[in-house]
Amino acid sequence: MSSHVITLKQDTEHHRCALPGEPWDIVPKFIEGGILVDLRRKLKRSTMIDKRHPLTKSYAPSLNRLKEAEKSHLVEHYYMIHPFSMFSFYFNMLVVVILIMHFIAAPVVYPLLESNWIINVILLPVNLVFISLIIITFSTGCYDETHNVVIMKTGYVAARYLRTYFIFDILSFLPQILRFSRMDEALQRKSFHMTTPILVILRYFRYFWCLKVLQNLRLYYGFSTFTYKAVKLILHITVGLVLCIYISFSFLASALIQLIQL
């Protein structure tokens, strides 16, 4: 019986169905021709659900459901990005790496540098990543783990983002806006010292999102649970310690500045 099953598996493993019906790759039906057609098809596929994504197996365990998800995406939400696409996966990985470096380095860099120009240059990559993250988040579908559904409606996606990280992402840019503002220099310096510590802390709310992305990273590369927990513990200790030192130093410095001005 077992040898018969193995034989059937070998016979069907590389089988290509020749029965009439829709082709497996349906992207060419939506991008039929034009300039750089192959590149455009690859870019579109990168924004669609991909079986290589670690969460795709739980959402679409069968090939039929995977195909239905692709078709629904192209027909109903063509310009949206699927949360289980490889574009979303790799972009989130890039954002997490830059943000974690920022979480650890920024509290150390801020107190040591007095030149606004140097600080702006250092923060430029982080700010560009945050701007890209805001734009892409508005264009990426949401996954409801409770009901195992992906919601791609733009209104729902926007409303969910506005209720969660949007306010923290936007307010975290205020220190950079104050640096470029044309207000009185003394008032600018006072506003900067008062608001920057609070607004820098707001950006740390993204740390919880980073942990979710790291979990997907563990599933994708097959890291052991022990390795993942060890890395997460090191991150907790490092980020928490640096943030506590920064908060203490910033508020103490602000209090001393106010006492001197009095």
Image (cartoon, rainbow, N blue to C red):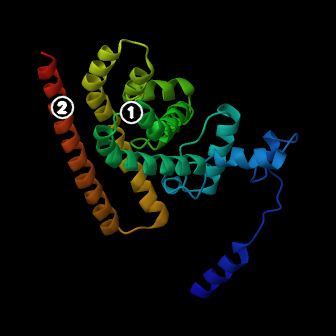
Q: Earlier in the sequence, mark 1 or mark 2?
A: 1
Q: Is residue 188 above or below residue 103?
A: above
- Please state which of residues 1 and 220 is positioned toward the viewer in this rendering: 220
The image quadrant that residue 201 belongs to is: top left
Name the residue at 66% across, 33% down.
Answer: 79
Is residue 122 in sight in this rendering?
Answer: yes
153 lies left or right of 13: left
| Residue drawn at x 63%, y 44% as measured from the top left | 47
Extreme residue in the bottom direction: 3
Residue at left offset 38%, top offset 33%? 115
Q: Secondary structure at mark 1?
A: loop
Residue 84 located left or right of residue 257: right
Quarter in which the N terminus is drawn:
bottom right
Mark 2 lies on residue: 253
Q: Quadrant of residue 229?
A: bottom left
Q: Say which element carries label 2.
A: helix
Q: CA distance from mark 1 to mark 2?
A: 17 Å
Q: Amino acid type of disc 1?
A: Ser
Q: Position of residue 21 (x, y in %)?
A: 80, 51
Residue 250 pos. (x, y %):
21, 34
Per the rendering, the mark at residue 115 is 1
Vertical side of 112 occupied by 56: above or below: below
User: Callout 2, which amino acid?
Assistant: Ala
Q: Quadrant of residue 245?
A: top left
x then y, percent, for residue 121: 48, 38
